[in-house]
Amino acid sequence: AGRQLLGKLSGLRSELTATALEGINPADAHRLLAQLETVKENVRNAIQKTPAEPPKKEQRYG
């Protein structure tokens, strides 16, 4: 069941990507996707470098 769902999701991803990039030169689309991967990686790295905030205590009344 899991493999079937992954296959379906992969197909949907491909359809969505094709729709989003419709009308864009394939070389430009490839370059854009590579740049977006770089942006995603930069954001992940920035999140990991951010010091964790201490957990906030719940304010209690009464």
Image (spheres, rainbow, N blue to C red):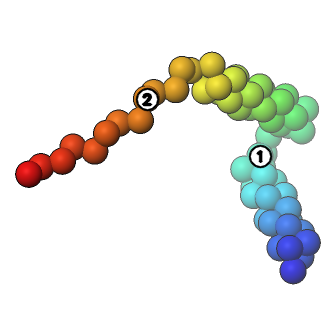
* Residue 11, position as x, y percentages in the image: 86, 65
* Residue 22, position as x, y percentages in the image: 78, 49
Frontmost of labels 2 and 1 is 2
Callout 1: few (<14), some (14-19), or many (20+) C-alpha neighbours within 10 Å? some
Tag of residue 54: 2
| Residue at position x 80%, y 40% in the image | 24
Tag of residue 21: 1
| Residue at position x 43%, y 29% in the image | 54
Judging depth in this view, the residue of 54 and 38 nearest the camera is: 54
| Residue at position x 31%, y 39% in the image | 57
Residue 32 seen in render: no
Instruction: Return the disc, 2 or 1, that comes first in the chain's sequence.
Output: 1
Kindly state the secondary structure of the residue where label 2 is placed: loop
Residue located farthest toward the left when viewing the structure as drawn: 62
* Residue 61, position as x, y percentages in the image: 12, 49
Disc 1 residue type? Leu
Q: Do the residues labelled 2 and 1 touch (CB within 8 Å)?
A: no
- Quadrant of the rendered structure where residue 13 is? bottom right
Q: How far apart are the two marked residues, 2 and 1, measured between alpha carbons?
A: 42 Å
Residue 29 versus residue 15 in the image, above or below: above
Callout 2: few (<14), some (14-19), or many (20+) C-alpha neighbours within 10 Å? few
Kindly state the secondary structure of the residue where label 1 is placed: loop
Residue 25 versus residue 20 in the image, above or below: above
Residue 32 lies left or right of residue 61; in this view the side is: right
Judging depth in this view, the residue of 32 and 56 nearest the camera is: 56
| Residue at position x 84%, y 58% in the image | 14
The N terminus, quarter of image: bottom right
* Residue 5, position as x, y percentages in the image: 83, 73
Residue 26 versus residue 12 in the image, above or below: above
Disc 2 residue type? Pro
